[in-house]
Amino acid sequence: MFDSKKIAAALAAASLVAAAPAARAEGKIRIAEQFGVVYLLLNVAQDQKLIEKHGKKQGVEIDVDWVKLSGGAATNDALLSNSVDVVGAGLGPLMTIWDRTNGKQNVRGIASLGNFPYYLISTNPAVKSIADFGPKDRIALPAVTVSVQARILQMASAKQWGAAQFKKLDANTQALPHPDAAAAVIAGGTEINAHFANPPFQEQELAGNPKAKIVLDSYQVLGGPASSTVLYATEKYVKENPKTYRAFLDALVEAAQLAASHPEAAADAYLRVNKGSIDRALLIKVIKDPKVQFKVSPQNTLGLAQFLFEVGAIKKKPESWKDYFFEHPALAAGS
């Protein structure tokens, strides 16, 4: 005799299993990066397949997609539309999206890409400091208002003219991808005569146009070495993909070690990924610059973050760098 109660119970259990949504399999990461040596750790990880390597150590075969965008606005849109899982952008765009998604997607930083000085370059002989910029000067940067270059310029303006005037030079800025802005500055055109750049474009400009000079150094504004470019993701992705997330962080740590100990090998990885877009000797010089530090833990980020709150650019006040970064042992020395 069949036990009708047991059969009914078994059928009910089976229906529950069928109705339950399948757990999302780990092993997929879509990364959006931008232009410049500040993304070197990602380039090394891509070239050496370090994410895949560390995924295998976690027992996961990781499929990595790489996307190149320009500007924090574009990267933030890509992240919020779920077109990518992790984005690389400036600290400014991170603070904007952290503030906007608080209590919702809860976007936070997952790592720094190291400390690099960003130079504001001008070819106008009359411009010796930001106080000398006139209405005809055009400053190229990756994204107007929200890029880290735009935010550092606002911070410098507040120091120069007072907090109420922090947007004084916003009208002079123009969104342009770094490679295009560098080409314009080197060519000596009149339409773009300044560029708040990043490595290696700022070094290319200084080498390629004798009129090009440094008007502002981001380290001066931020009070020393600082993580200007960072990686960030949604809380959902980090929580649902712990092994992929760990593999990604471990890959970045290995890439940072390689860049610090073998700058020539790191330069060659950059050239392979970016199709030889810069002179190798100049690239190695940039990587070996004593001002450059390859660290995955964020450094000296709170000053800019709190400035953005003070001027009303973000609504939520960050009390600590841990407010806008996920906790991870690799970030223990952060600030």
Image: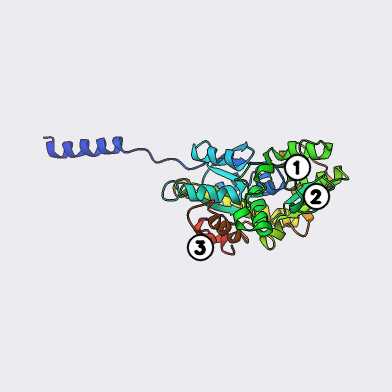
Q: Nearer the viewer, mark 2 or mark 3?
A: 2
Q: Are marks 1 and 2 in contact (CB under 8 Å)?
A: yes
Sequence-first disc among 1 and 2: 2
Q: CA distance from mark 1 to mark 2?
A: 9 Å
Name of the residue lying farthest toward the right: 210
Q: Position of residue 81 (x, y in %)?
A: 49, 36
Sequence-first disc among 2 and 3: 2
Could you tell me if residue 58 is visible in this image?
no
User: Which residue, given by chain and number where applicable, does mark 2 sit on?
Assistant: 127
Looking at the rendered structure, the kind of residue marked 1 is: Asp
Q: Nearer the viewer, mark 3 or mark 1?
A: 1
Residue depicted at x 53% and y 58%: 328
Q: Are marks 3 and 1 in contact (CB under 8 Å)?
A: no
Residue 1 vs residue 25, the one in the foreground: 25
Q: Position of residue 249 (x, y in %)?
A: 57, 52
Q: CA distance from mark 2 to mark 3?
A: 37 Å
Q: Are marks 2 and 3 in contact (CB under 8 Å)?
A: no
Could you tell me if residue 4 is visible in this image?
yes
Q: Position of residue 145 (x, y in %)?
A: 61, 45
Looking at the rendered structure, the kind of residue marked 3 is: Glu
Sequence-first disc among 3 and 1: 1
- Point out the image quarter for the N terminus: top left
User: Which residue, given by chain and number where applicable, does mark 1 sit on?
Assistant: 137
* Numbered mark located on residue 319 in the image: 3
Label 3 element class? loop
Q: Looking at the picture, does residue 155 appear above or below residue 9?
A: below
Q: Residues within 10 Å of mark 2 (few under 14, many from 20)?
A: some
Q: Residues within 10 Å of mark 1 (few under 14, many from 20)?
A: many
